[in-house]
Amino acid sequence: MKNTSQGKKIRDADTRELKFQALAGDLRRGILAGTWAVGAKLPTEAQLAAETGMSLTTVRRAYEELETERFVVRRQGAGSFVAERQPARRPSRFTVGVLLPDTQLYYPRVLQGIEETLSSHDVSLRLATYNYDPAREDSSIQFLIDSGVDGLILVPTLAGIADPKQRVRELSSLNVPVVLLERSLMDLGPGDRTEHVCSDHQGGAYDAVTHLLELGHPTVSLLTRSNTPTEAAIVEGYKRAAADLGFTPLVRRALKSEWESGAAEQLLQEVLSSGSTAALVFGDREAALLEAAARRAGVAIPHDLALVSYDDELADLAEVPLTAVAPAKHRMGKMAAEILLRRLVEGDDCPVHQVRLRPRLVIRDSCGAKHGADTRAHKLQQR
């Protein structure tokens, strides 16, 4: 035989539960609609019980619910009042760590893209830099891990170290997902299993050389800043363009310190003596130094020597505004953040993303494209 009295108690409890929630909902809607203004006193428990026919216990529970939700402030001996509402903030689900070599020149736009994407998804960001110092790099990554990040966007040191593959294995074995930015094991081809977003620096160099040859220059020299992570890809793209377009490559390298100590004069003479009438220069600063050396030597840019710089950070500020290869820095940051967020949400169901963004060429004054036929006519007259 069923215990009907026990069943009645359960139904009565369910009814009381629904009643206090329904009353809390009515009061909540009234507060949000402005029936009671911020700071207004609400009906007493006794008044509300009389108006609704509900028990004092039900009314009290409704007020307690609204107090927990911060719709109501209850003051001892004074009553219940509408609380001042704070804008609701959804707590961040994830925190992402970002490691950059520095925050100067190249990386501010990258970081802006990362920040905008993470912020739009209410994801927190923690930033660390290591100033191109491998010893600081490890401690900076450990700092991010120890701070409790859920994933990492890293720009690590892979060039100039003994075993880049081992370094990537170490980074991939961290206990959080990792997306590399502007770094990959390019030489491995399909053996590279890293998740990364990089500029196609080979393509950028190739397009710059193609542009200069289309302007009528039979050969193009390449001048670079040595010992940088980007140099190898630029040299490879340049050499591929030389092979495809049929001219003998001329590559000249100098360290950053050598460029700053007067190497531009010697490099300029080597380019001119080779018969080149155009050069691709990595990066903007070095191209600006070459322009200054050309001015001192009486060499007109672009009439005597056409230039394209690589990076487009300071190119528009040069004496002759520089045509420049411009990596998609902001877009790169956005895509790295988007890929990491997908990985965090989808886990192993997310395919591995390996993205290369081909830079665009920004035409200014130093390549002669704006002068067209006048530049070529001047060159022919000088020969």
Image: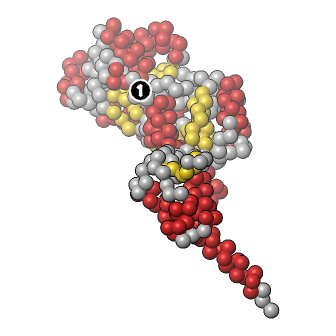
Q: Nearer the viewer, residue 227 or 143?
A: 143
Q: Nearer the viewer, residue 134 or 187?
A: 134
> Does dot 1 land on a helix, a strand or a loop?
loop
Q: How many marks?
A: 1
Where 151 falls versus 285 (above or below)?
below
Disc 1: which residue: 313
Few, some or many residues within 10 Å of mark 1 (<14, 14–19, 20+)? some
Q: Nearer the viewer, residue 125 or 340?
A: 125
Q: Horizontal placement of 218 versus 156: left or right?
A: left
Q: Whole-percent x and y of residue 320?
A: 30, 19
Q: Residue at x 65, y 41 (%)?
A: 149
Q: Residue at x 37, y 11 (%)?
A: 293
Q: Whole-percent x and y of residue 25?
A: 51, 63
Q: Residue at x 59, y 71 (%)?
A: 18
| Quadrant of image for the C terminus | top left
Where 339 falls versus 184 (above or below)?
below
Q: Whole-percent x and y of residue 60?
A: 61, 60
Which residue lies most toward the bottom here? 1
Q: Nearer the viewer, residue 203 or 28?
A: 28
- Amino acid carrying mark 1 in the image: Glu
